[in-house]
Amino acid sequence: MATIALPGTETTAVQPVSKGPDRRGGRGGRSGKAGPVTYTLLTLTALVSIFPLYWTVVAGSHTNAEIAATPPPFLPNASLFDNFRAALDQAPIGKAILNSVLVSGSITVGTVLFCTLAGFAFAKLQFRGKGLLLSLVIGTMMVPTQLSVIPLFMMIADLQWVNQLQAVILPTLVSAFGVFFMRQFLISALPNELLEAGRVDGASTFRIFWSIVVPVARPAMAVLAMLTFLTAWNEFFWPLIALTNANPTVQVALAGLGSGYVPQRSVIMAGTLLGTLPVLIVFTILGKQIVGGIMQGAVKG
Amino acid sequence: MATVTFDQATRIYPKAERPAVDALDLEIADGEFLVLVGPSGCGKSTSLRMLAGLEEVDAGSVLIGDRDVTDRPPKDRDIAMVFQNYALYPHMTVGENMGFALKLAGVDKAERARRVAEAAKILDLSEYLDRRPKALSGGQRQRVAMGRAIVRSPQVFLMDEPLSNLDAKLRVQTRTQIAALVKRLGTTTVYVTHDQVEAMTMGDRVAVLKDGVLQQCDTPGELYDRPANVFVAGFIGSPAMNLVTGQAVEGGVRVGGAVLPVPREQLARAAAGNGQVTVGFRPEAMHLVGPGQGLPVLVNVVEQLGSDAFLYTKLADEETDDVLHPSDVVVRTEPRSAAAAGQKLWLGVREGALHVFDASTQQRVD
Ligand SMILES: Nc1ncnc2c1ncn2[C@@H]1O[C@H](COP(=O)(O)OP(=O)(O)O)[C@@H](O)[C@H]1O
Ligand SMILES: [Mg+2]
């Protein structure tokens, strides 16, 4: 995530108008080449970031006894598929992945849509109680999740939703952070004249939202979508309470792995790898396109 | 096409002490090109936005044709607006930008394409219809903004400083093109600018605003020849009219050591306030006279323009060469004038070219 600059900043960064020869030839300008120091630092950062994943592969491909040895192994071994099998036997990981895709996908679509709507309203529309409502929204960010878990669970229980996916989807369909994030973006990225032009052209507020606001907000929506999807995928606390191992999300399923008198760390690691793989694959394949989409949105604006 | 009427229209922004637009009364004829001009912050944009329906009207009313539109939203007013920064939809192509309003109005696709193509042809934009605004030059964007207005064939065009983002040369060119285009379409137009040259060259009539109050609305010629008050006199014309305040004396107004002749009856009315009278004379209304006969001035700077020359002078004492007043008196002379900096000259004001204002009310007296 760290590689994605905040939207809005790109607009100036990618403008192709840097005129004047002094700009091009100048040292240390934006177009300057990276030196050995930069490369070394970047390599180190990359290694540090990749290590946990690498260790998951290493640990997941040994038997439990092998990783307990001193010194621990540093190269992958042959037991990966045995461990996969063990993990799949112990928990419904296939179903869990499907559930997680459903849950994270719905939460992402909902959050992006509702946060953009609310962000737009707070950023550009005039209505009574706007300041108070915004403070309320921001205020909810300060309430710890733990505080609302019990009343929330009682509500879910009353609705007979325990162990059903809507129990984890519905409470997170909109986020205060997302509303605030979209508001901040739209305040600066969406000129009032654009909305006024829309009104003079005869568009309703809703039409203005779809045809003018959403295209402008796209880069921020993409960032919010990625953040939301990852957060939802990794969410553990509430799903663990609302769901059971009969109908789990990935994180809940993983929690049930390798439990016994001696925790089977290799099976846990193999399962974790299985649970992470879908997200990893999606972001490696789509990452370029997502970032590309963001950049395109920002430049064409 | 339609007339436009502002009837005592007033806008007071929340928390503002005084109105941004104060009881504006203006009648704009069908097909007329009216320019709203005035210094920055005088309420031009606010007036225009009240007509557009983008700004509330706190008192009075706004009419388009015979219809009171004071409380109607913009889309019910059948107007098109050109914004200062053009406000083109960044993610739509030029064609889509121009066709958006038609699309919203439910015009079918073929008809839309035809009208967009027609407008694009008029504005020389045909080859850019598939481009995004980002990929256009400033002048081209300006034309797209115009195009977006004309495809709709609205009742009224509203333009808020549409040329202020262009460079000086393009601005002069585009100014003539817009004026010609609007004349040809015959659509009622309200045009806002802070540039008095733009106002004078484009407008059928020009309305001068100051601090939210309408000062005068007249043809460019009338505005120039008979400014209603000191503000309009100083605002219209470049270089500006020379304005000097002096004591009314027998036969005229004393300016420095000299007396500028003003007819007795006119003088009496102008001096009715506090005895002080402001007189104005344009740079081209002056001629050189013999020593001791008119206003003595000291030449400060000579500006040679080729077609003519401007002398920037200061009022001087009759006998000594002391400067009496720090403000400039600008004089237009022959291009090859022999006047040089430091020289003392005597100026006369051409017959009938003296503007007289009551210094206490600032109003014109004829
Ligand atoms: N949205 C607003 N809120 C409060 N005051 C405003 C607003 N817009 C303009 N004003 C004030 O109203 C006056 C007129 O503004 P405006 O019509 O934009 O002037 P201009 O003649 O430069 O177009 C100015 O003093 C300005 O500060
Ligand atoms: Mg303005």
Image (cartoon, rainbow, N blue to C red):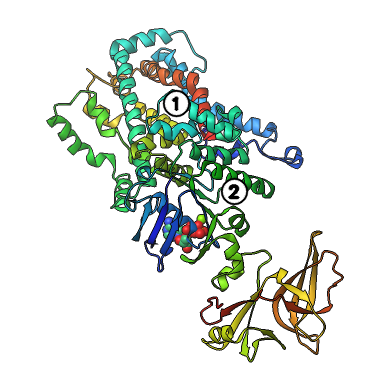
Tell me the mark number nearer the camera, choosing from 2 and 1: 1
Q: Which mark is residue B111?
A: 1
Q: Which mark is residue A241?
A: none
Q: Nearer the viewer, residue B99 or B250?
A: B250
Give percent across and percent down for residue A265. 37, 19
Quarter that holds the C terminus of chain B: bottom right
Q: Secondary structure at mark 1?
A: helix
Give percent across and percent down for residue A8. 51, 40
Q: Amino acid at mark 1?
A: Glu
Q: Nearer the viewer, residue A244 or B343?
A: B343
Dot 2 and dot 1 within a common chain = yes
Q: Residue furthest left?
A: A158
Give percent across and percent down for residue B264. 60, 87
Q: Quadrant of residue A32?
A: top right
Per the image, the residue denoted by label 2 is B163
**Above or below — where is B149 with respect to A285?**
below
**Above or below — where is B331 with respect to A125?**
below
Horizontally, is A159 left or right of A290 in the view? left
**Above or below — where is A241 with respect to B153?**
above
Quarter that holds the N terminus of chain B: top left
> At 48% from the left edge and 55% from the top edge, which residue is drawn?
B45
**Spatial distance from mark 2 to mark 1, Cα to Cα?**
30 Å
> At 43% from the left edge and 52% from the top edge, which residue is drawn?
B49
- Residue A223 visible in the current orientation: no
